[in-house]
């Protein structure tokens, strides 16, 4: 019983850390970020840990999982105000770039040292996140594509969502639209249909395609009444008038 309790506590602690990291780092991936995207990323990461059945299967996976928890904690570390010295017992960084660079090294180490684990797939996703936050769009694209082509359906859908967001922000509208449409046609638990529809509608709106944006928002409002998504669609429709 004690061993089982320790196991559950470690899982819960790791889930909280991973959720927070996902929520904090997801914002860059789409121009009109909302809580649905952060939740989608958190769902797939936590599901991979709690439901994948590999967290404690081997010493290698246990080490990889521990290192992933350390890397996500780095992403959660606070940023110091200008001129404030670092505190020895409190991890902190002088800038978001410095923090991303530190986390990226940790994620890369996991990918290099545990390449055949599910943990490495998640670490590779976060490599894309940190690369994008540092402005290295090519590296981010490569990381997201690698995860999207992996065998994990749920994590692949999240990587594709992030990739579409990256394309949206780098004026590759046609490529972004194609991915969003694919995600709409093939939703997953992590990336539901309405999530992709909202992102595609936002892309249409920001790229001066109001008719297409309106069509999607109206569809979302019809399909998801009395929900957060439906309310957001109603607000967007009002702004388009």
Image (spheres, helix red, strand yellow):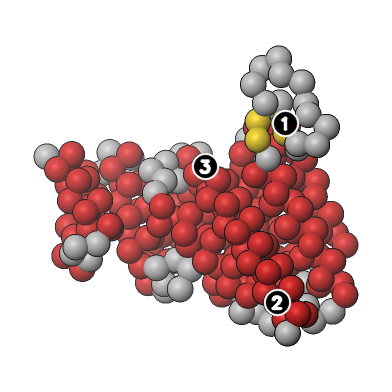
Instruction: Give me the C-alpha separation between circle 1 and circle 3.
Output: 19 Å
The C terminus lies in which quarter of the figure?
Answer: top left
**Residue 151 percent across, percent down from the top left:** 64, 76
User: Which-is-in-front pick, marks 2 and 1?
Assistant: 2
Q: Secondary structure at mark 3?
A: helix
Tell me the tag on residue 28: 3
Q: Residues within 10 Å of mark 1 (few under 14, many from 20)?
A: some
Along the viewing direction, whichever of 142 and 81 lies nearer the viewer: 81
The N terminus lies in which quarter of the figure?
Answer: bottom right
Q: Label 1: which residue? A: 93
Q: Secondary structure at mark 1?
A: strand
179 vs 234: above or below: below
Name the outermost residue toward the top.
83
Residue 238's image quarter?
Answer: top left
**Residue 198 percent across, percent down from the top left:** 32, 55
Q: Is residue 200 left or right of residue 95?
A: left
Q: Tell me whether circle 1 and circle 3 mark residues in contact (CB < 8 Å).
A: no
Q: Residues within 10 Å of mark 3 (few under 14, many from 20)?
A: some
Q: Earlier in the sequence, mark 1 or mark 3?
A: 3
Q: Residues within 10 Å of mark 2 (few under 14, many from 20)?
A: few
Residue 219's image quarter?
Answer: bottom left
Q: Is residue 29 left or right of residue 124?
A: left
Q: Earlier in the sequence, mark 2 or mark 1?
A: 2
Tell me the tag on residue 5: 2
């Amino acid at each position: 019983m004690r061993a089982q309790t320790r196991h559950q506590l470690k899982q819960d602690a790791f889930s909280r850390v991973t959720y927070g990291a996902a929520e904090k780092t997801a914002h860059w991936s789409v121009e009109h970020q909302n809580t649905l995207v952060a939740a989608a990323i958190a769902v797939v990461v936590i599901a991979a840990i709690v439901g994948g059945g590999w967290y404690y299967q081997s010493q290698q996976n246990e080490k990889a999982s521990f290192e992933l928890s350390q890397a996500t904690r780095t992403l959660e570390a606070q940023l110091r105000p200008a001129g404030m010295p670092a505190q020895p017992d409190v991890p902190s960084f002088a800038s978001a770039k410095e923090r991303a660079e530190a986390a990226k090294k940790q994620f890369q180490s996991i990918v290099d040292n545990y390449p055949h684990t599910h943990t490495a797939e998640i670490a590779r996703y976060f490599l894309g996140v940190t690369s994008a936050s540092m402005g290295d769009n090519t590296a981010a694209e490569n990381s997201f594509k690698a995860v999207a082509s992996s065998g994990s359906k749920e994590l692949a859908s999240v990587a594709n969502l992030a990739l579409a967001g990256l394309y949206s922000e780098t004026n590759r509208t046609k490529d972004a639209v194609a991915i969003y449409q694919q995600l709409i046609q093939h939703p997953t638990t992590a990336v539901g249909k309405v999530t992709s529809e909202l992102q595609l509608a936002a892309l249409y709106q920001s790229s001066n395609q109001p008719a297409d944006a309106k069509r999607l928002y109206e569809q979302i409002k019809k399909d998801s009444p009395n929900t957060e998504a439906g309310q957001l669609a109603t607000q967007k429709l009002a702004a388009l008038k």
